[in-house]
Image (cartoon, rainbow, N blue to C red):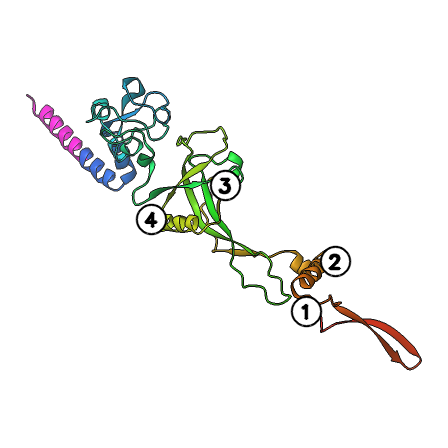
Amino acid sequence: MRLGTIISIGASVVLALGALLIARLWMGNHPAHTAQAQAAAPIPDAPVVVAAIPIPWGAKLDYHYLKVIRIPRADMPQGAYAGVGQVLNQEGGPPVALQAMAAQEPVLATKLTGPGERQTLAALVDPSMRAYTISVTAATAGGGHILPGDRVDILYSRELPQPPAKGDNWAPKIVGTTVLIQSVRVLGVDLNANPTSTQPAVPSTATLEVSMQDAEKLALAVQSGGTLSMALRRPGSAAIEPATHFMLDDPRRYARPAAYAADRAMRHASHSGIPHVERSAQVTVVSGETSSSVSVPNETARF
C-alpha cells in the first residue's frame, strides 16, 4: 500500500473521532436534544383490566364485561387488576359491581364487592362510618326526589317545654328547629340502594351514612320525640354552615290582632272570674283654651 493511501486513511480516522467527541460535548450542553432522544426510547407498559362495555351498578361480573389493555406502568391506578382471571376467579365466585363503570374505565378493587360478598348496603358504607335508617314521609324527604347518592342536611324539630301559665298569662306553643347534621350521604331510600336511580318515589325510610357520633344524635332525637326531616343539597355542595337554632312562638303573640286580644280576655274571664279590663284608656289633656284626647296604656291590664 502506498504511503499516501495510509496517510489518507489515518487522517479520516482522526477526523471521525474528533467529530464524535465534538458531538458528545455538544449534546451535553443541549439537554433538550437528550430528552428527545430519551423520549424516543420505548416506555415500559403493563396490563390492566378495564370495562369492555358499560357495567351497571349491581351487575355480577363475567368475561363479556371485561378486557385487558396495556397502559404506561407509571399510569397504573392503585387497586387495578392485571388479568381477567384475577377479577373473576375469587373465593366465593365473581364479584358484583358496587358502582356503575363506563367502557374503558379501569376495574378497581374498591368498585367491587370482596371475595364471597353479596351486593348489600353494608358494602357501600365507607370505613369508620355507619348506616342509620330514619323514618320519613314525602314531606320530610324532599317529596320523593331524594335518591341514593344524594347529600342532605338533617333537621330536627320538636315542641319545646314551657313554664306553666300563671294567672292571666297564657303560655303559647313553642316549636324549635335545629340543624342536626350536615352534608350526609344517602345510601338508600326504602329498599333502593342504586346510586344511578332517577325515578322519584314516595319513601317511608331513608338510610344515611353517618359517623358513630352522628348515629347517637339521630337515636337520641328519635327517642326524644319530634320530627327528622331532610333538606336536599345541590350536587357538589359540601359547605358546612354554622350551627343554627330557630324557635317559633305563636305569631299572634307579636301581632296582637283584635282576635288575639279577645281570645285572651275570654281565657282570663273563664279561668279567674275577673272581668276584662281594657288595655288603654282615654285621657283629656287641657292646655290653655285647647283640649285634646289621647290614648294611654292602662297599667291595670296585664297580658
Nearest to N terminus: mark 1 or mark 2: 2
| Residue 177: % across, % down | 52, 53
The image quarter in which residue 246 lies: bottom right
Q: Nearer the viewer, mark 4 or mark 2?
A: 2
Of callouts 4 and 3, the N-terminal one: 4
- Number of residue marks: 4
- Which x, y percent locates residue 178? 49, 53
N-terminal-most mark, 1 or 3: 3
Q: Which residue is mark 4?
A: 212
Label 2: element kind: helix
Is the C-beta separation of discs 4 and 1 under 8 Å? no
Q: Quadrant where the C terminus lies? A: bottom right
Secondary structure character of the magenta stretch overall: helix
Q: Position of residue 194 (x, y in %)?
A: 40, 30
Q: Amino acid at mark 1?
A: Arg
- Figure check: 49 above or below 136: above
Mark 2: amino acid = Ala
Question: What range is drawn magenta here?
Answer: 1-18
Q: Which residue is mark 2?
A: 258
The residues bearing labels 2 and 3 have C-alpha atoms spaced at a distance of 44 Å
Task: Using the numbered discs, state the Cα–Cα distance from disc 4 to disc 2 in whole angstroms.
Answer: 51 Å
In the displayed structure, 173 sits above or below 29; it is below
**Mark 3 is on which residue type?**
Arg
Considering only vertical position in the picture, is 200 above or below 67?
A: below
Query: Residue extending furthest right?
Result: 289
Vertical arrangement, residue 3 with respect to residue 287, above or below: above
With 63 as the anchor, is 139 left or right in this view?
A: right
* Disc on res. 234: 3
Label 4 vs 1, first from the N-terminus: 4
The numbered mark at residue 302 is 1
Q: Is residue 42 visible?
A: no
